[in-house]
Image: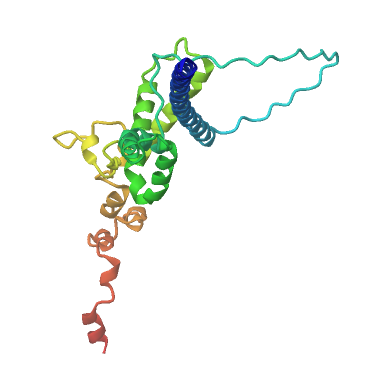
Amino acid sequence: MEAAREKTVDLKRRIKETEQNNDVIVATIERTKRMIQRARLERAILMERLETQANHIVATELESPPDSPVFREPSENPVEKRKETKKQPALRDPSLPKRPQNAYIIFCDTERENIKRKLEEAHPDGNFDVNKVLSEKWKSLGAAGRHDYHELYKKDRLRYAREMALVPSAGLSPTVQKEKQRAATYLKKVEMDGDGEAGTKRKSPMEDDSDFMSEDGDDVTEDEDLRPKEDTPAKHIKLEPSESALEQPSKPGEPAAHPAEPAAPAAVAPVEPISEANT
């Protein structure tokens, strides 16, 4: 009887140890799940940053012309090349304007929380991928559904160009100087094309004379050739007498009616009454 009691106590002790070990394993599994979710979130953020940088590089290459190749003559005394060490990219100045985000990033920022909430309701175990669902939904939108996000990207890009144009050039690094030049070029192109925030086309000086005329109608600019002048040389030529009348000298023996002959127009000579008299 005593042996059975000791055996029962030993079994209870082993069961208790097993339960404690199970609790430790369950806690480890939960902690591992949280670490996996955190790793997925960090991966999604890194993928978004990589896509943003890739789009920025492509846009930069399309806007800026390629550098002309420079030919260097080989030196007579070649110097051994030093081992080049990769330089780490300098951190961007936080005081500079924030670079624009492309249409896909704007869509992800707008819809991420809504999609994540729906996925958490549908999958309580956390077995879902928000980025994959966002990518599939973006592909299913089509051109019409993406239009609003592209318009937001254009406005954000125009905002970036205008803010970069206001940044003083003194003390900027060569990279930021190039960004400022590209922003100024893009802003000038937008102003010429008339694709501002309002989306209205600017009127040219010939379409809107109010930019060049004062209230009393006088020209207030120096661009006189943009508006037609009232007196043209053709009107003065029509009012002058013919050259034949000016070249014929007057003779004292001729009658007084002779100088008045050039005043008669040449088109009056073949009139109908004269032809009827001849018949």
Residue extending furthest toward the bottom: 279
Q: Nearer the viewer, residue 55 or 46?
A: 46
Residue extending furthest toward the top: 171
The colouring scheme, among rainbow, by chain, secondary structure or one colour, is rainbow
Q: Tell me if residue 213 can be seen.
A: yes
**Coordinates of residue 5 in the picture (x, y in percent):** 45, 17
Q: Nearer the viewer, residue 69 or 197?
A: 197
What residue do we see at 41% from left, 25% from top? 99
Quarter holding residue 158: top left
Q: Nearer the viewer, residue 127 or 115?
A: 127
Quarter holding residue 169: top left
Residue extending furthest toward the right: 76
**Coordinates of residue 247 in the picture (x, y in percent):** 36, 54
Residue extending furthest toward the front: 1
* Image quadrant occupied by the C terminus: bottom left
**Coordinates of residue 98 in the picture (x, y in percent):** 39, 22
State whether residue 25 is above or below residue 244. Answer: above
Residue 124 appears left or right of 46: left
What residue do we see at 39% from left, 35% from top? 125
**Coordinates of residue 211 in the picture (x, y in percent):** 24, 35
Q: Tell me if residue 194 can be seen.
A: no
Q: Nearer the viewer, residue 41 or 152?
A: 41
Quarter holding residue 41: top left
Q: How many marks?
A: 0
